Amino acid sequence: MKAVVFDKVLHFRDDYPRPEPKAGETLIRVLHAGICQTDREIIRGYMGFRGVLGHEFVGVAEESGRAGLQGKRVVGEINASCANCRWCRAGMPTHCETRTVLGILGRNGCMAEYCSLPDENLHVVPDDVPSDRAILLEPLAAACRVLAQVPLDGTEKAVVLGDGRLGILCAWVLSTSVDLVTLVGKHHWKLELAQGQVPVRTRHVDTCTIDDADVVVETTGSADGLQAAMGMCRPRGTIVLKTTVAEPHRLQLAPVVINELRIVGSRCGDFADGMRMLSDHPELPLARLITSRYPISKALSAFEAVEKGREIKVVLDLA
Amino acid sequence: MKAVVFDKVLHFRDDYPRPEPKAGETLIRVLHAGICQTDREIIRGYMGFRGVLGHEFVGVAEESGRAGLQGKRVVGEINASCANCRWCRAGMPTHCETRTVLGILGRNGCMAEYCSLPDENLHVVPDDVPSDRAILLEPLAAACRVLAQVPLDGTEKAVVLGDGRLGILCAWVLSTSVDLVTLVGKHHWKLELAQGQVPVRTRHVDTCTIDDADVVVETTGSADGLQAAMGMCRPRGTIVLKTTVAEPHRLQLAPVVINELRIVGSRCGDFADGMRMLSDHPELPLARLITSRYPISKALSAFEAVEKGREIKVVLDLA
């Protein structure tokens, strides 16, 4: 089958073996796959991953033991857990000690004609939700995770730092719960794209003087983002850290103690929360984030386009 | 007056001018002053401080406008706030934008015959509390701050990393609220000293295999402490960060995001909480932490002793 494979270098292959789903897994025919910041980090060595890339998809459940799934359009949670280890038993399956993660850890991903996931990971996409919205469900759920982790009463001054796809989604999602959300970034065109339909204020990072945010969501994808976030936060404020950086980097931590900041690491979100956000907030213009699409055979060009930084979400089409 | 002064180098002087308390401030005749890790950091350049060092003391209120204070034995909160800025008005006077901090920021400290503090910063030491317990009130209050910041139900697995004075105090204070507290350090003699009378388990860092703590309090005073704390924490666990390090240092932050850790910066505590801990828990053997005492004229020898690392709390005696 066609697949985008990383084995120290990035390849497009058309002879990759189809996945053979284990018991309890569904075989998914992929329709669309998204390229994410994490994929770029993996190509730089993050997680030491080798295999088929990709963890954002919309597909069709082709072979499934789960009743009612076969033939349905689906999206999928990316962590496959053992249900048995100490963290699974403690109700944290996304932190399973032997978990595999679609296209990230020990499991081939979805930039291919087919992928497989445990039956229970899959969510049927309602007929009235177009694939161009559903393809954003994984990052949308990750944005919703902020609401699950940080108690908000709506009066907070919230800042999202980073105008990439996750940053814009976090700002949009926060705007459903908080009155004053400011998206801070360094790309005028991305900040512009984030506005309209959604009550989000934007500031260019060079002219931003915010130093009293109650909550700063750090999504820059850059090693320097956390330090910048510290400067924007009020004493005893909260920083939600989304950026995963492969390499160690230099950081001045004294402000965390002096200002008694809280830093909350934040990873994947619950797809059910993302799905609810999709239905409850049709005004969130998700499809606007898709700035380019490529057939999977042109995946390497797609990755090059992403590297040039003129894209928000690039989608690979399988069909 | 006699004073320990830092002006790029550390001096003992006997001709330093007495402080002249402003309106609303009390003049304190110092009886005892403690040497703290923060003093060592200041000598290395932290905060760019110049002046009389010291922020831990027991003294006598010599001249005070506050009713009932004069002649009383007192300890004092170290942050002097403006009561007027946005953070003071928001109920966070210890984060006042124009605050001075005794012996740390814009205010001469207590390693001298006299110091001054706002009247409202002072707490009378009850007659039945000996000075050798009261001198530990500042770090004791800082340890109590952990209980104020992190909600605990008593069933948590708590680890304190660092067997210095603050680490031992944090372990003792946590043991009043949590069943299982483990103090992890690298000095066998300090770990031994922490035991007895207080239900605290100890582990040497070289043989410690803990990776599932609900809460890790990081008090090592070392730039590497936070990374070690990350390894001891369960997914979604909490790290309370006490160490302030002057210099930027290299850190691998990916585990914060991958394991969704919470890092809570923690600074000074409320002296009222410390005082309550003193009275409610007479079993906490605070005076045991005082491993040496020096007359203030021998302060430089005292600092040398601290640098050698064979001390827990060194006290300078003024009288």
Image (cartoon, coloured by chain):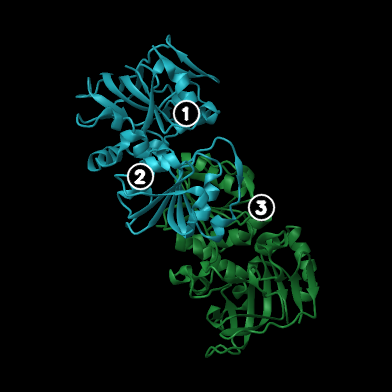
Chain colours: A cyan, B green
The amino acid beneath tag 2 is: Gln
Q: Position of residue B78 (x, y in %)?
A: 58, 72
Check the image and report above or below for B46 versus A82. below
**Lateral position of residue B113 relative to residue A100, left or right:** right
User: Along the polypeptide, which appears first: circle 1 or circle 2?
Assistant: 2
Q: Say whether marks 3 and 1 touch (CB < 8 Å).
A: no
Say which of marks 2 and 3 sits in front.
2
Asked if the residues shown at circle 2 and circle 3 are in contact, with their CB atoms under 8 angstroms apart, the answer is: no
Chain designation of label 3: B
What amino acid type should be assigned to the residue bearing mark 1? Answer: Val
Determine the residue positioned at 37% across, 42% down.
A194
Q: Nearer the viewer, mark 1 or mark 2?
A: 2
- The kind of residue tagged 3 is Glu
| Cα distance in 3D space between marks 3 and 1 | 35 Å
The answer to whether A39 is drawn above or below residue B24 in the figure is above
Element at label 2: loop
Q: Which residue is mark 3?
A: B247
Residue B117 vertical position relative to residue B62 in the rendered view, above or below:
above
Contact (Cβ within 8 Å) of mark 1 with mark 2:
no
| Residue B15, position as x, y percentages in the image | 80, 81
Quadrant of residue A62 within the rendered picture: top left
Can you say which quadrant of the picture contains the N terminus of chain A? top left
| Secondary structure of the residue carrying numbered label 3 | loop
Between A56 and A268, which is closer to the camera in this rendering? Answer: A56
Query: Which secondary structure lies at badge 1?
Result: helix
Residue holding disc 1: A306
Tell me the residue that label 2 is attached to: A195
